[in-house]
Image (cartoon, rainbow, N blue to C red):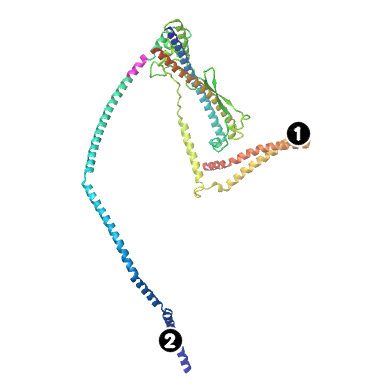
Amino acid sequence: MSDVIKDVGKVWDRLFDHKGFLSGEIGFMLREFELKRGDREVDNLFSVIENITDIKDTQVDCCKQAGDQTVLKANEALEQALNICHQFVDLEEKYKQDTTVEDNRSDRKLVWDCFMNRITTEYSEINGSLEAKEETLNKLYEEFEKKIISLIPYFYNDKLRKYINGVKVCDDMPYGISNIVFKNKVKKNVESKANIGLEPDIFTKCPLKTSDSKNSDKLLNLSDLHWLYGYIQKDNSQNDNKIYLHELLEGSEIILPKNKEIPRSEELEKRCRQLKAQQENQSYYKMTKHVDMSRKRLPEDSFGYQVKQMNKHLVAIFQFIVSVAAGFAFGFIGIELLIGSLDFGFRLLLGIICALTIALAELYFLAKRLNEDLQLEYTVEKQQKKC
Amino acid sequence: MVEIAEDLDRICTTLDKLTLDSLSLIEEEIQLKLILENSMCEGETHLAKARYIMGHKNVSALQLPTENSPEFSASIQTLSNEDEKLYGQKSFEICSIKKDEDKSVHDPIKWFGILVPQNLNYAQNMFKQALQWAIQAINVQTQLRETLIAIGQLKKVKANMFVK
């Protein structure tokens, strides 16, 4: 029992008696703070004392001297600056009191306003007078035009008409001139050149009415002019008072053929529009084919489509082989039947030559056809859509 | 006075001839231009037929040479020569250059493939004819211009004579 109590006491000691541990720790702390620290603080204090005595002895005097000097200088500079500032202030006050600039400014503004007013009034006057003159000129021109239009038929080409009317009647007078000379008009059959099919280029001159240029009764042809020229030559050789063709022709009008504008027929327009709409629909369909699976069933997925494509290609190849074989057969057997008996090697050679030429030609067409196959796909789809 | 009258007479007769000449030249030029237009139209219809046969992608601007293709020279070229009779006027004529003389001459039909429909050949012939008509029209036009210039000068001379 007593052992147990002793043990329990020992355990209690061990658990709750911290004296030894505490003393060890305290000893450690003491050592740290006192031994190791040692004289560190004292040294610091001594160095501080040294510095302070140093400063007390030397530095304070230096500072005082330097400060005295610089302060003096700063004082002088500041006083100069202050003087200058006072001068500035004085100047500004003087300037503010001086009103000449302002007066000049207001004077100039007055002058400018006067000037602008004057200019605007003058301009408006000039514009008004211009417009009035423009109106008068327009009226003048209108009157002139009316006079000219009414006068032309009487003054222009009077010379030519009078001369032609005075022409002696002969047998070989061309149509145009005879139309003017005689009162009864001879209707000239207008020949149209068969291969051109446009209006013939009658050279026409001497219109007697300015409005109606298609009035072919009073128009002259090139052959008329040639005839007239010959007549004038004959006339001039006899007379002294010569008349010249270029003077007679002054002021005449040359009438050139015009192009007939054929408007596009309505049916063609309608058809064009329909075809355009169809093409646009096709291209849109091509674009949106792969977008929506539920809307359009891709025809390429169906088994029938694939079989058809394969069939097409197989048929093309079969065609190729049959053509080549037929060519060989012709060369081998056919030529012998035509001509007579031939050597076997020679027959073979002929057969191979025929087969080669046919093969080359077929290859070319096959290649072209395979190149076009892409377009056939879309036509197949279109047919399917229609059905 | 008599000399002036004779001069005036000569000037006026030449003026007459020149006026008539100018009128006939105008007519000739218009006719040539109509024929030119006709052959161009026919050439273009043949080209359209060829396009219908071969498909619109095989006869289009894709077949024309672009900037990167090798250079080649034309097979029909124009030469101008001064004619003695017409007092130094220039007249033009065309000559076709064959492939043997100049290696860089190409036949444009080769651009459309090897076996082309006959319509392309017809179209090419029509365009060649159109070229010839065009050259003739140009010659007539130069003659007309010279005639008009001569008429203007003579009229000035005549006016001066009247002033004197």
**Which mark is first along the chain, 2 or 1?**
2
Identify whether A193 is placed above or below A49. above
Which residues fall within the magenta stretch?
Answer: A146-155
Q: Nearer the viewer, residue A72 or A124?
A: A72
Q: Mark 1 — on which chain does it sit?
A: A
The furthest residue to the bottom: A2
The quarter of the picture where residue A165 lies is top left
Q: CA distance from mark 1 to mark 2?
A: 138 Å
x and y, in percent, of residue A134 in the image:
29, 26
Residue A209 picture quarter: top left
Helix, strand or loop at mark 1: helix
Residue A325 in sight in this render: yes
Q: B15 or A313, which lies in front?
A: B15
What's under tag 2, amino acid-wise? Lys
Q: Quadrant of the C terminus of chain B?
A: top left
The residue under the point 45% across, 90% down is A9
Q: Is residue B113 above or below residue B82?
A: below
Q: In the displayed structure, does residue A339 sit left or right of residue A25?
A: right
Q: Position of A313 compared to A152: left or right? A: right
B109 sits to left or right of A115? right
* Tag count: 2
Q: Position of residue A123 (x, y in %)?
A: 27, 31
- Asked if marks 1 and 2 touch (Cβ < 8 Å), the reply is no
Circle 2 sits in a helix, a strand or a loop, which is it?
helix
Residue tagged 1: A336
